[in-house]
Image (cartoon, helix red, strand yellow):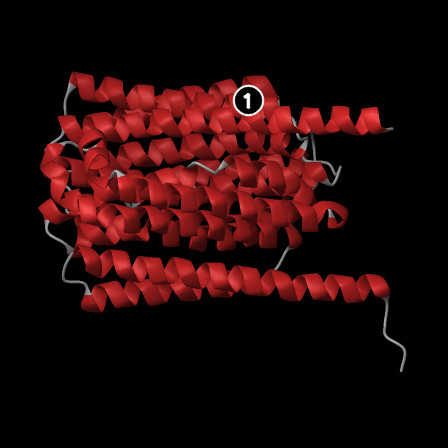
């Protein structure tokens, strides 16, 4: 028995290490794109590139919702074909809808043409089409395959972006390359995972869409909160200052994405009442510890770090780097908490996330006069999300305990 437990523990550690390595590789190559863009593009082009890249991330919410829906269904050993079909439909609808909004979005982001937004629409459709494959392997706890898909998608996205900038050093060229890489990644993911597309009824299809929309409502708020600062910086700050903000946000993304493997590993366990408490506790400790270490590290080497990541022309950012890193760490904790509540179907968290988002946007639009006017309210918003998530989990945990123990005697 002890030998079996030891073998299982070793396997879990190896799996976690493999997924952590895959997500780390994905994050490293993703930052290669940002670092190269910071050096090749002029600050005005770099600001546009960062804003549209954030738009791609925000537009990927349907993909996150589909992946979570398929993963939760698969983890519960239920049929997934209807969820997969709904994912394909949403991929087409999302790409088309974003494409139709291209003129309005280009005007909002002060872009010279709609080309970057059209490229973003194609990229978002490809990411969404990849989601059923991602969710299938995640829910089945095939974490090695999941790691391959995550790392492969990131490598192809970055490779396409670098190729685009090599052809022409503009935001439009880089984003067209990103979209091309994401299309190839989608094809590869379907080849590896082979998601089922078997026959189903209209009722099961509608049920799958409803589950996906509920998950999407929660994840949309989360993605908007974690990316709104870059978009708002482009909107309310000068072109130069928004470029500086994008450079600082690289450290936010590092702290946010570095522990990304934790929610990936924890989500199937969070759907299981028997494993949830341990998965939640270990997940929060891992993400919080990673964030704290990064904040201390960037505080010690802020100047050289800025020079390496963005170049000497962004040296004035150095005093702000620990704050940018702290923002990413808080968002990483908030993300884990949101996924925990998504796994249990907690609807009040949807309202909480959207309330924080709307408050943040209002504060920035009404008061922001410089870089700190965007960053400081973002830190406050992230802190509120973490506070809500921890408090809400404590309440739900007590309810589960009372339900398991039965009603108290009078």
Screen quadrant of the N terminus: top right
What residue appears at the point 79 percent right and 29 percent down from the top-left corner? Answer: 5
Q: Residues within 10 Å of mark 1 (few under 14, many from 20)?
A: some
Left or right: 393 as drawn, with respect to 58: right
Tell me if I can see residue 98 in this picture.
no
| Above or below: residue 125 compared with residue 293 | above
Quadrant where the C terminus sits is bottom right
Q: Nearer the viewer, residue 16 or 103?
A: 16
The residue that appears at 69% across and 61% down in the rendered structure is: 397
Viewed as shown, does residue 31 lie left or right of 275? left
Q: Residue 352 at what x, y percent from top left?
A: 48, 65
**x and y percent of residue 354 in the render?**
43, 62
Residue occupying the point 61% across, 45% down: 282
Q: Find residue 239 and report its horizontal and vertical position in percent.
A: 11, 46
Is 280 or 62 nearer to us in this picture? Answer: 280
Instruction: Give x and y (percent) for residue 85.
Output: 59, 35
Tell me where residue 86 sits by quadrant: top right
As helix, strand or loop, the secondary structure at mark 1 comes to: helix
Query: Label 1 belongs to which residue?
Result: 190
Q: Is residue 261 visible?
A: yes
Q: Quadrant of residue 371?
A: bottom left
């Amino acid at each position: 028995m002890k030998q079996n437990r030891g073998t299982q523990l070793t396997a879990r550690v190896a799996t976690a290490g493999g997924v952590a390595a895959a997500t780390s590789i994905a994050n490293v190559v993703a930052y290669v794109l940002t670092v190269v863009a910071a050096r090749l593009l002029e600050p005005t082009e770099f600001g546009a590139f960062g804003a549209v890249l954030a738009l791609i991330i925000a537009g990927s919410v349907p993909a996150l919702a589909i992946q979570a829906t398929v993963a939760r269904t698969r983890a519960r050993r239920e049929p997934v074909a209807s969820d997969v079909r709904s994912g394909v439909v949403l991929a087409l609808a999302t790409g088309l809808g974003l494409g139709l909004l291209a003129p309005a979005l280009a005007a909002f982001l002060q872009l010279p043409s709609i080309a970057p937004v059209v490229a973003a629409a194609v990229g978002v459709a490809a990411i969404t089409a990849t989601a059923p494959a991602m969710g299938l392997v995640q829910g089945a706890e095939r974490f090695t395959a999941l790691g391959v898909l995550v790392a492969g998608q990131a490598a192809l996205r970055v490779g396409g972006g670098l190729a685009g900038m090599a052809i022409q050093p503009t935001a439009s060229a880089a984003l067209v390359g990103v979209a091309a890489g994401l299309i190839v990644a989608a094809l590869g993911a379907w080849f590896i995972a082979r998601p089922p597309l078997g026959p189903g009824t209209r009722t099961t299809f509608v049920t799958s869409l409803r589950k996906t929309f509920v998950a999407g409502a929660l994840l949309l708020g989360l993605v908007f909160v974690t990316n709104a600062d870059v978009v708002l910086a482009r909107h309310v700050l000068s072109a130069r200052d928004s470029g500086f903000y994008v450079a600082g946000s690289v450290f936010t993304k590092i702290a946010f994405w570095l522990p990304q493997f934790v929610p990936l590993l924890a989500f199937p366990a969070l759907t299981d009442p028997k494993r949830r408490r341990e998965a939640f506790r270990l997940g929060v400790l891992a993400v919080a510890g990673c964030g704290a270490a990064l904040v201390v590290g960037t505080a010690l080497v802020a100047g050289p770090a800025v020079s390496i990541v963005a170049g000497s022309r962004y040296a004035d950012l150095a005093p702000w780097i620990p704050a940018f890193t702290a923002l990413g760490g808080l968002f990483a904790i908030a993300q884990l908490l949101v996924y925990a509540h998504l796994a249990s179907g907690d609807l009040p968290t949807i309202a909480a996330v959207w309330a924080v988002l709307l408050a943040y946007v209002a504060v920035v639009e009404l008061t922001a006069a410089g870089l700190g006017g965007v960053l400081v309210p973002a830190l406050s918003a992230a802190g509120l999300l973490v506070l809500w998530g921890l408090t809400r989990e404590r309440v739900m945990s007590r309810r589960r305990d009372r339900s398991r123990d039965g009603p108290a005697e009078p």
